[in-house]
């Protein structure tokens, strides 16, 4: 199993030449999910890989750090201890990896119509046509005349079989480049002498074609058969010609090497066209499966390129669009994979915005590709996402197949005592009071010190407002942007603060009492809206953070919450809730 342990991005989008080394654990054959909050730099990593060419890295101006074209951009990866770098002068990755990046292809298009002296433009959402092959190989024929080559052979040229069918067999032609070096060697004088010796022996025989073949002494071929270049060509011929004798194999060999040596350029052009035809056929066969859903999806040659014309995006849903584009991208990649290669396949947040049905379909296509090629090549499938891992666990990827890497390394360790309290919040002796006084807003104080002691919880938190003082201290750390705040405490404090704000707006004591007795923050807010009218959306929006806090079970579920808390917009929203002005808050903020 191969492992990529580091990605270093220099002067591309959000990455400068500092703090640009990213420790990762990307394993071949696993579905590697790279998780990071929006704004971390996932798109910068993707842009770096998309900027690779065969010979160097070429970064578009808008993707250069601060769009400063004077800066030199580069990308390095470390695989199994070996570092490969691409910069404006070289691309060491190209010798070891094929790289493919898939992301959304939705674009804005404008269609113009001439109407008298006016030109109207109708805008619509479209999908870029897929360019499968930029320049299709020229279609040409190999110069071959059985009569001419028989005349050249000599008196018994009649024994040469007509190989026209072989010269239009795309499967055979596509493998000829594997033996180019063997065919090139046939031009050597010694080898031509051996070939001419065989021709003389055959021309010295008499009778019908069948008699000549039967009377030929196969021992005469021993000298040729000691040459690996002869054997390599013959082995390829045997794959496509059944029930062939050794003399007949020589006659095929003679013609193939003669045709090649007399017209290398034309033969090589035909080989490239054959490979293209096979690729197109395989691609169209795979595309036919998708075509059952989207009947007007097909390949076509357009201005020397092979493209897929895409439908107007208004004719399909966003989910269908993403399934369609990802499926076609994967088909293209699948058609290009060769055995023994190393492929880095990056899916850039395509998964993040799919509904459950389309998510399942896309995962199916992706899993198919991984399963089919994990034994044929070294495959590094990578999904870039900002989603909670619970999102993926609910669908088709097996947890054993997934390898999770969190890109943001300044991960904050939650307070162990708070985690322990939350893990035991369901204990019957403390359940009601923990929920009432510690996890939701209440004017009263908890009195459970003895039970806390018996449960080996932080004893002082079971009495008075000590726990609330802890919460406000952690919230102050968060608002000051200290690095060591406890995310659990921040989430709980946020929930209590929002409930307190709404509670204090209720006009009567009876309404306040019912608010306290109502379970769950969302239900409390909905109750208050029936009395006060619509509450600020921010109270509900932040529920994605404060609702997770009391139910986190493991590290993989904690990290997405931390990522959200570290988002600058979320930080500003929470500062707004607490009306933070740079001065530490007091317990009065939540009690």
Image: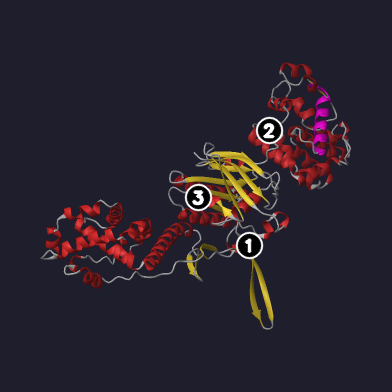
Instruction: State the colouring used for the structure image.
Output: secondary structure
Residue 330 percent location from the top left of the image:
51, 53
Q: Earlier in the sequence, mark 2 or mark 1?
A: 1
Report if residue 470 lies within the magenta region. yes
Would residue 193 appear left or right of 288 to someone viewing this image? Answer: left
Vertical side of 454 occupied by 170: above or below: below
Front position in the image: 66 or 581: 66
Tell me where residue 163 sits by quadrant: bottom left
Give the magenta part as a residue range.
462-480
CA separation in Å, label 2 and label 1: 40 Å
Q: Main secondary structure of the magenta part?
A: helix
| SS state under label 2 | loop
Q: Earlier in the sequence, mark 3 or mark 1?
A: 1
- Residue at x-position 72% and y-position 16%: 454
Residue 551's label in the rendered image is 2
* Residue 168 appears left or right of 516: left
How packed mark 1 is, by other alpha carbons closer than 10 Å (few <14, some 14-19, many 20 or more), is few
Does residue 563 appear to the left or right of 256 in the view shown?
Answer: right
Position of residue 67 measured from the top left corner of the image (x, y, whole percent)? 71, 58
**Residue holding disc 1:** 107
Q: Circle 1 sits in a helix, a strand or a loop, which is it?
A: strand
Is residue 493 positioned above or below 297 on the image? above
Q: Residue furthest left?
A: 207
Residue 530 badge: none
């Amino acid at each position: 199993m191969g492992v990529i342990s580091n990605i270093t991005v220099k002067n591309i989008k959000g990455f400068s030449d500092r703090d640009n080394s990213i420790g990762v654990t990307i394993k071949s054959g696993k579905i590697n999910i790279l998780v990071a909050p929006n704004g971390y730099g996932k798109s910068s990593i993707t842009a770096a890989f998309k900027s690779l060419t065969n010979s160097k890295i070429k970064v578009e101006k808008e993707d250069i750090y601060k769009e400063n074209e004077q800066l030199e951009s580069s990308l390095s990866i470390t695989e199994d201890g070996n570092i490969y770098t691409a910069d404006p002068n070289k691309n060491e990755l190209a010798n070891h990896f094929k790289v493919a990046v898939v992301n959304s292809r939705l674009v804005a298009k404008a269609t113009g119509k001439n109407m008298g002296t006016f030109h109207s433009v109708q805008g619509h959402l479209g999908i870029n046509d897929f360019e499968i092959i930029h320049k299709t190989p020229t279609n040409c024929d190999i110069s071959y005349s059985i009569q001419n080559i028989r005349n050249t052979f000599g008196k018994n040229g009649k024994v040469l079989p007509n190989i026209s069918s072989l010269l239009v067999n795309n499967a055979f032609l596509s493998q000829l480049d594997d033996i180019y070096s063997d065919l090139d060697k046939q031009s050597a004088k010694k080898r031509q002498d051996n070939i001419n010796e065989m021709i003389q022996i055959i021309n010295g025989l008499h009778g019908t074609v069948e008699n000549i073949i039967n009377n030929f002494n196969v021992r005469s071929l021993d000298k040729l058969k000691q040459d690996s270049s002869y054997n390599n060509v013959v082995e390829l011929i045997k794959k496509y010609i059944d029930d062939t004798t050794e003399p007949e194999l020589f006659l095929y060999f003679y013609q193939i090497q003669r045709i090649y040596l007399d017209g290398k350029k034309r033969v090589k052009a035909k080989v490239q066209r054959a490979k293209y035809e096979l690729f197109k056929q395989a691609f169209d066969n795979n595309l036919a499966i998708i075509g059952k859903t989207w009947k007007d999806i097909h390949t076509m040659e357009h201005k020397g390129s092979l493209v897929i014309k895409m439908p107007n995006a208004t004719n399909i849903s966003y989910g269908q669009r993403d399934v369609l584009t990802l499926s076609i991208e994967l088909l293209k990649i699948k058609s290009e994979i060769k055995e023994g290669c190393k492929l880095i396949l990056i899916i850039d947040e395509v998964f993040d915005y799919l509904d459950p049905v389309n998510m399942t379909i896309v995962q199916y296509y992706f899993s198919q590709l991984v399963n089919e090629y994990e034994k044929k090549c070294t495959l590094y499938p990578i999904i870039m996402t900002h989603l909670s891992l619970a999102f993926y666990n609910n669908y088709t990827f097996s947890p054993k197949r997934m390898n999770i890497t969190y890109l943001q390394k300044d991960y904050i360790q939650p307070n162990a005592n708070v985690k322990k309290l939350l893990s035991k919040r369901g204990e019957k002796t403390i359940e009601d009071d923990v929920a009432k006084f510690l996890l939701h807003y209440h004017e009263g104080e908890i009195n459970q010190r003895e039970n806390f002691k018996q449960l080996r919880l932080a004893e002082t938190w079971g009495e008075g407002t000590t726990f609330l003082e802890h919460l406000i201290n952690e919230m102050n750390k968060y608002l000051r942007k200290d690095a060591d705040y406890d995310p659990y405490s921040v989430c709980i404090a946020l929930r209590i603060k929002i409930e307190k704000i709404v509670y204090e707006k209720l006009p009567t004591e009876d309404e306040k009492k019912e608010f306290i007795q109502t379970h769950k923050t969302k239900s409390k807010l909905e109750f208050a809206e029936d009395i006060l009218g619509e509450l600020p959306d921010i109270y509900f929006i932040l529920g994605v953070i404060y609702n997770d806090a009391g139910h986190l079970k493991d590290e993989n579920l904690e990290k997405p919450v931390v990522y959200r808390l570290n988002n600058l917009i979320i930080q500003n929203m929470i500062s707004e809730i607490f009306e933070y002005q740079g001065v530490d808050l007091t317990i009065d903020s939540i009690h």
